[in-house]
Image (cartoon, coloured by chain):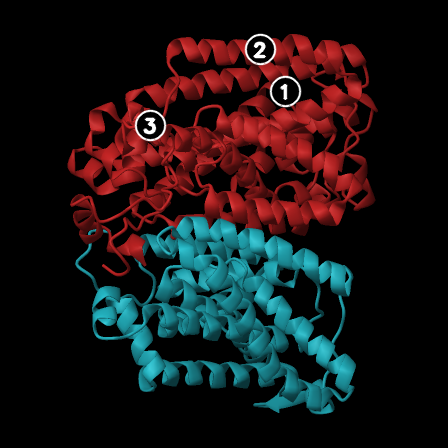
Amino acid sequence: MTTTATPPATTTPSTTGARKLPSVAEGPGVWTTGPRGALIGLGIGAVLLLVVAPLTLGGFGLDLLGRYLCMAMVAVGIGLVWGRGGMLAMGQGVYFGLGAYIMAMHMTLADTTLEGESIPTFMRQNGVERLPELWGIVQHPVIAVAAIILVPTAVAGLLGWAIFSRRVKGAYFAILSQALAAAFAVLIIGQPVLTNGSNGLSNFQSLFGWDLDDSGNRLVLFLVVAVILLAMLAVTWQLYRSRFGELLVAVRDQEERVRFLGYDPALIKTVAYMIAALFAAIGGALFVPVVGIISPADIGVVPSIAFLIGVAIGGRATWLGPVLGSIAVSFAGTQLASAFPSAWVYLQGLLFVLVIGFLPGGLASVIGLLRRRRPEGRGGGRGDGSAGAPDEPGDDPQDTTREATEPEAAR
Amino acid sequence: MEILISQLFAGLSLGSVLLLAAVGLSLTFGQMGVINMAHGEFIMAGAYTAFTVQQILGSAGVSLLVSLPLAFLVGGLLGLILEATLLRRMYHRPLDTLLVTFGVSLILQQLARDIFGAPSVDVRLPELLSGPVMIFGTPVPASRVFILALTVVVVAGLSLLMSRTSLGRRIRAVVQSRELAEASGISSRRTDALTFFVGSGLAGVAGVAITLIGSTSPTLGTTYIVDAFLVVVAGGIGQIRGAVIAAAGLGLLQVFFEFGTTASIAKVIVLVIVVAFLQIRPQGIVATRTRGLA
């Protein structure tokens, strides 16, 4: 209603893509690797992570890489909701934190039992005498794992359904998810008796009875992390090619039309959000044994948003982009942050400004931009329009319809 | 009774701080569809302006009077620069402005850290504002009364600006229909810049006010930005009236629940209430009616 003729919403890609809905997976912005490409991609990843990395990296290097891989799991989920689904989830740290804290609680308890104590040290220091019930639940490993999977997914499901079914979207959703992250961090800091407050939980000895100091066990842990990440990639690849994946992109581009076609966008979005939450939770749960500490500093507003930058750099709507971008950013972060802490923050800020402001499709779109010069023209050429590089608007008569249907998003 | 009054006042006081932080945001977010995460850092810039002015002038009272307009200018100029360099290019991508301005806020925070240092600094209160004032026989901090009054003045001023001045008319015209406004000879570009100047300037003023009730640190903005956003969302985007109601409501709710539980639990409850409220009224408390589907 307001503003110009450009499609207003979040990701303005390809009204072209939406117009040929059936083939959306081949359309611009949603370039999906074919089965062979996916196998090659996963194969290369598997060789690199499962063979090359353990052989070349020492224990310390593997731990670092394992940490990056855990963060990358969150990025896979963000790629799904944000890149494909157009929902800017700024609070994934919540689900990461839920998974991590459940795991950390379980591990702390297991260690406590090993030491022959009944309650964790920090609780004793806080004057607690009986184990809080919340902790007692996750004492059993099976229940802990189930909780890691179920709790974040359920929270995301409830919250997502509440938000999406009322058609709260765009910026509103982003702000709510961000507020969720803020509230969650505040909640954890505010309950020092239950969570050890801002110190977080750390000093873990064992995971499911395995000694975490043993280098062989650490190698196995790394391999498990790598395999899980690869499995997540396989799952997302399959999702992106499925009807669900096509619908997700369609919802991102033209939610109203999907609704008119008889699908329920709220359901599609909620499911995507739940999957992303699950991935983040698993990443968080693995983060704890790999890194050895979880604290509110890892899950608040700023870390939650920081997850996004790797995804944006890699190409938010691509299959492998989020993972690669996330690993690259984590790597750069650890390299720079210790040597030049203030320079790293400036660089991070600049990356947000430059990548999202000027290269919204991420590095993956560079290929597309080059391809665009080919005579075949805009239709097939825009490698990644996902972020709607301000593409010449107005030449699409449907833009107007779109504005008529979505005034809310324009404001 | 005394508890009730002091609780009520605490809620309104918190609400007024929230409103002061949110009103500029509401202006830029609502009227231009730009989500400015750096708004919190403009607040911080205002707070540091107050600190710097006091360092130079010494007298707490005079420096407060000087820093209010000066912080408005500082915030406004920061906003102008941001608008002209980045946001102007991305009006059609509201979600992306969110992330770009987050990048800007990271940079501004680090700048503050490098200039003023990471530890927080304190601004001295003027004599007049340091003691308590009696309201209905209940002592309340004078600084909070001052903030309440400042908020009333600022909001009243903004409503007058929007309803009576030519700038306000132009802003409303551009919001209602950019094309039509341009066709009538209004420079939407200049209007955008001015709106951003005013909105960001108000953040600066909010920063000065916040120095009166707490210390100033580089992360000051992050403490307020999320709550300010909630006020804007719950109030209805771009609605000053809605923002006033929402800020008062959120402030009262927060204080009310804090009374029974702790601050952190209260915060979570308030968020849940906002989400639940958006279930009933997704468009916020006050909304312009459209024939849109959304």
Quick one: B264 or A136, which is closer to the camera?
A: B264
Amino acid at dot 1: Pro
| Quarter assignment of residue A262 | top left
The picture's colour for chain B is cyan
Q: Position of residue A43 (x, y in %)?
A: 53, 9
Mark 2 on the same chain as mark 1: yes
Chain at tag 1: A
Q: Residue at x 33, y 65 (%)?
A: B285
Mark 1 on the same chain as mark 3: yes
The picture's colour for chain A is red
How far apart are the two marked residues, 2 and 1, measured between alpha carbons? Answer: 28 Å
Quick one: A396 or A336, which is closer to the camera?
A: A396
Q: Residue at x 42, y 70 (%)?
A: B193
Query: What label does residue A397 carry, if any?
Result: none
Amino acid at dot 3: Arg
Q: Is residue A179 visible?
A: no
Which comes before the other along the chain, label 2 or label 1? 2
Residue A6 position (above or below residue B43): above
Q: Which residue is mark 2?
A: A46
Which comes before the other along the chain, label 3 or label 2? 2
How far apart are the two marked residues, 1 and 3, measured between alpha carbons? Answer: 56 Å
Q: Position of residue B138 (x, y in %)?
A: 62, 86
Q: Which residue is mark 1?
A: A141
Quick one: B65 or B281, which is closer to the camera?
A: B65
Q: Position of residue A79 (x, y in %)?
A: 46, 32
Q: Is residue B114 visible?
A: yes
The quadrant of the picture occupied by the N terminus of chain B is bottom right
